[in-house]
Amino acid sequence: MIPVIMSGGSGTRLWPLSRKNKPKQFLALLGEHSLFQETIIRLANIDGLEAPIVICNEDHRFMVAEHLHELAITDAKILLEPYARNTAPAIAVAAIQAQQTGNDPILLVLAADHVIRDNAAFHQAIEQAKLQAEQGYIVTFGIVPTVAHTGYGYIKAQEKNKTSSVEAFVEKPDQETAKAYVESGNYYWNSGMFMCKASTMLEELEHFAPEMLSSCHQAVVDSVEDLDFIRLGKDSFAACPSDSIDYVVMEKTDKAVVIPLDAGWSDVGSWASLWETHAHDENNNVTVGDVIIQDVNNSYIHSDSRLVTVLGVDDVVVIETPDAVLVTSKEKAENIKSVVEALIKKDRNEATTHRKCYRPWGFYDSIDSGNRFQVKRISVKPGASLSLQKHHHRAEHWVVVTGTAEVTCDDKVMMLSENESTFIPLGSVHRLHNPGRVMLEIIEVQSGSYLGEDDIVRLNDCYNRD
């Protein structure tokens, strides 16, 4: 059995914590591990489990690699999608990749950003699903509904409370319809988790979407290995139609069965659902970080970088980050996408990028900026290097705070220790390298007419970035 971890989401419904450059699957929202890591951790002790296949976009590849590295997983296959094409092509390329060993493994398809509280119940459902998958069925895990939720699609089972053939997949209902579904007893929330043989999925795709499957086959044939990643063929994947596995296969196949899953599942799709997932205090509040509240009930308050105080309000969501603050009622929190869309229209960086940006060599934090200047704190991992680069519009001053820096500036190479500094003139070819065994931290002061991240001309890069 091979876990297939789908990690292509952008998570805008949890803005401002979750953004395009670091979406919710890479955030530790419920503990010390990210949701992506929790997805893998909860598979521990399942017999016959092989290394995972992870599908993500190119922008997130180094975060995926780092999160796997932290779990000491070195044999995962990381497939990079050059374009977003929804779940059907992603599952198709995973099935094709899985069969390249010459076997016909069972695929356990999971989203990277879900929460499951009861691992024992989840493992039991996996064992039941495996029996069905071995017989050539495509199993979907139907979540036993706890409320008449209008934010999920539903699965109608032919029989109640047991493994059953799927009668229908239905779209997100209105409140009255959702209530009728829950009362009937044979409707489940559609979790988006599946299990089947790789060959079964490919046969159904061949039957229902041959053009899509052909493009996916060619994308795998055209793929190239790049460091720890497998880059799918760009042109062939671009030609692939975009569609979900529900529409392409699950709503049409006669091989679909549903297994009820009652395991404390949540897709953490909104601030209200994240509030539901946490343990509450005596007033039904959830507080994270440096928070002081008085006379507050049924609320979610999150502080990322400073003190947040809330007084005399109920049913609110307050999210503080270093560069943005969200205040909303829980009822209106579902509409956060409209705020993100407005930010995008105004070309605001806060829509997609955090102040603290992660790179394969470490991270930088934009501390301050103004007219013709910007200040960053740059942290470089031991042994790591930034690209050999130059800028057309800015000069830089570097001050070493911690560690040792090896600085290349045109034809000079120098070593700088704590409290030492150097100047990188506009247009100079330069590189920053950490030769030591501890993190290197520097303060960078940029000055010039344009300070955007796209004013980087990479001449050489050990991470194969453009």
Image (cartoon, grey):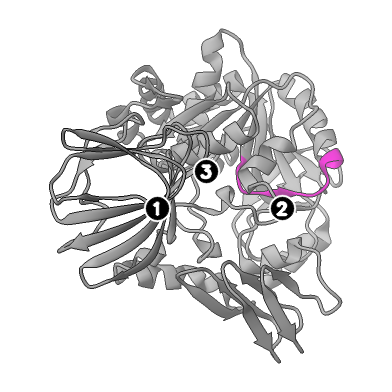
Element on which disc 3 rests: helix
Percent of width and height locating residue 445: 29, 60
Q: Is residue 16 above or below residue 140?
A: below
What span is colored magenta in the figure? 111-121
- Residue annotated with mark 3: 247
Percent of width and height locating residue 19: 47, 58
- Is 112 inside the magenta-drawn segment? yes
Pick whichever, 457 or 441, lies toward us. Answer: 441
Q: Is residue 10 above or below residue 182?
A: above
In the picture provided, is 189 more to the left or to the right than 402?
right
Residue at 40% x, 31% y: name it.
212
Percent of width and height locating residue 380: 44, 42
Residue at 81% x, 69% y: name it.
280
Residue type, mark 2 in image: Gly
- Residue annotated with mark 1: 419
Q: Residues within 10 Å of mark 1 (few under 14, many from 20)?
A: few
- Is 330 inside the magenta-drawn segment? no
- The nearer-to-camera label among 3 and 2 is 2
Q: What is the number of callouts on the image?
A: 3
Pick whichever, 1 or 224, lies toward us. Answer: 224
The quarter of the image holding the N terminus is: top right
